[in-house]
Amino acid sequence: MADKLIIFDTTLRDGEQSPGASMTRDEKIRIARQLERLRVDVIEAGFAASSNGDFEAIRAIAGIIKDSTVCSLARANDRDIARAAEALKGANSSRIHTFIATSPLHMEKKLRMSPDQVLEQAKLAVRYARQFTDNIEFSPEDGSRSELDFLCRVLEAVINEGATTINVADTVGYGVPELYGQLVRTLRERVPNSDKAVWSVHCHNDLGMAVANSLAGVQLGGARQIECTINGLGERAGNTALEEVVMAIKTRKDYFGLELGIDTTQIVPASKLVSQITGFSVQPNKAVVGANAFAHASGIHQDGVLKARDTYEIMRAEDVGWTANKIVLGKLSGRNAFKQRLQELGIEMASEQDVNAAFARFKELADQKAEIFDEDILAIVSNEAQADSSEHFHLVSMAQHSETGERPSARVVFTAQGKELMGDAEGNGPVDAVLNAIESQVQSGAEQLLYSVNAITTGTQSQGEVTVRLSKGGRIVNGVGTDPDIVAASAKAYLSALNKLYSKAEKLNPQLTP
Ligand code: KIV
Ligand code: ZN
């Protein structure tokens, strides 16, 4: 039997640390359910001590998820560990993941602790965690820049205390594949009790090498757990992308010789869900989940693929969950057909009322657009989910005028806590005019950090998906809006971002504070 490789997903914890990717409890639950369908082995659901909201989200996920182990991060102190244990109480299978920095730079400048103090704190943390569970992961933060002898001492000590997984963190993405792989190997060879733990890799993508480093940690180093996120989401340049490592291990089984528990057909739905919830769109040429990942533009390639698919394709699009842009429903489809498609897509609506609201939106869309694809349905559900969280602003109607040689103008009618407002403004283009019209009434003063438009299916009939990232008072939020009219999608995205800024619903944003 080939060795099993454990897939540890940290989209809900490390992924959530991306600017504006902070999620609500319900959004986290929706992603956790999809991760379970994907059959990831471990879901790191959050960082329980970071906020009450994150604690509650972990607790809810622990109560719902049955097939994956649910994990919480905890700094190496009693309070964090007790909070993690409390949040995980209801889980079928749980893990506490504790960490402390071990590099000279982090110990001296950030923690202001001596190496002996760090060693002692790591030991005490794992000893304390043992009171709650025997599934304990320990991470030496900034492990790849730590001094080897000291790292060996810390890891030997925490394994003695009962740590069952050792996660070699390349926190700042400093590693290069050969050296990182060797580091994992050397640690496994030098730490006397290394065989009592599963070795894990955790790589950041600052130099674009997170996937390569993780695979080197597995192949050269003998690690048997990879920590990763959907779409490679994560702070700065992100984390190792789950879809890439999974498909590399699967496609090159001849080389890696490892077994995975993942249902790869759930990869694309997971990617779309995470992208819609966080507002981080996926670049078209992104491996596996990008819109062009299986598109062949060159005549030579198209000809080859038609003659024999494997001339230019090493994976099958269906194996990672791409549906061939199937027209699934149309104007005449009824509520039952709609509901059944939701079930086939693995979408569980909380109530019949929610199904009705989504169905009403589907009917509106079917009036605007003849062909409705799975992507459209996912967008509808995502919009509805955003809309229900005690929406502050809601678009009623809009009109805009643009003509060659004229300055574009727009009028937007929207409600603010039920009160109708109307804004008129001009702008550099129709989108700018619409956003100015909204801002003329709201006067949020928020800074626009990002505006992007994507077609969610193909052709000009497609719905446009707009992401707007706003920043105000130190908070960063992403709003997403979809509509066949990209100016309307922009208005919706802007209002959705404002809703997040003004929302009282707690956003869970676990930042690691020293
Ligand atoms: O990057 C990092 O060091 C982390 C640890 C908490 C594992 O995310
Ligand atoms: Zn990390």
Image: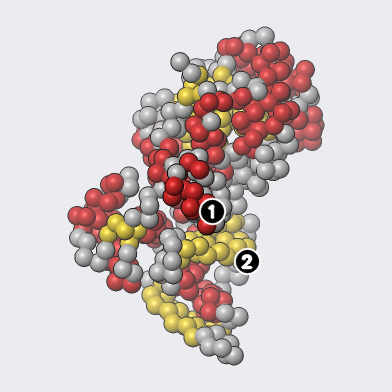
The residue under label 1 is which amino acid type?
Ile
Q: Residue at x 72, y 15 (%)?
A: 153
Is residue 72 among the parts visible in the rendering?
no
- Would you say 139 lies left or right of 484 here? right
In the rendering, at what x and y percent does residue 372 appear?
33, 62
The residue under label 2 is which amino acid type?
Glu
The local secondary structure at tag 2 comes to strand
In the rendering, at what x and y percent does residue 168 appear?
65, 27
In the rendering, at what x and y percent does residue 269 appear?
41, 47
The quadrant where residue 90 appears: top left
- Which numbered marker is on residue 131? none
Q: What residue is shown with label 1?
A: 300
Q: Name the quadrant of the C terminus.
A: top right
The front one of 425 and 107 is 425
Q: What residue is shown with label 2?
A: 447
N-term-proximal mark, 1 vs 2:
1
Give the spatial CA distance, label 1 vs label 2.
Answer: 47 Å
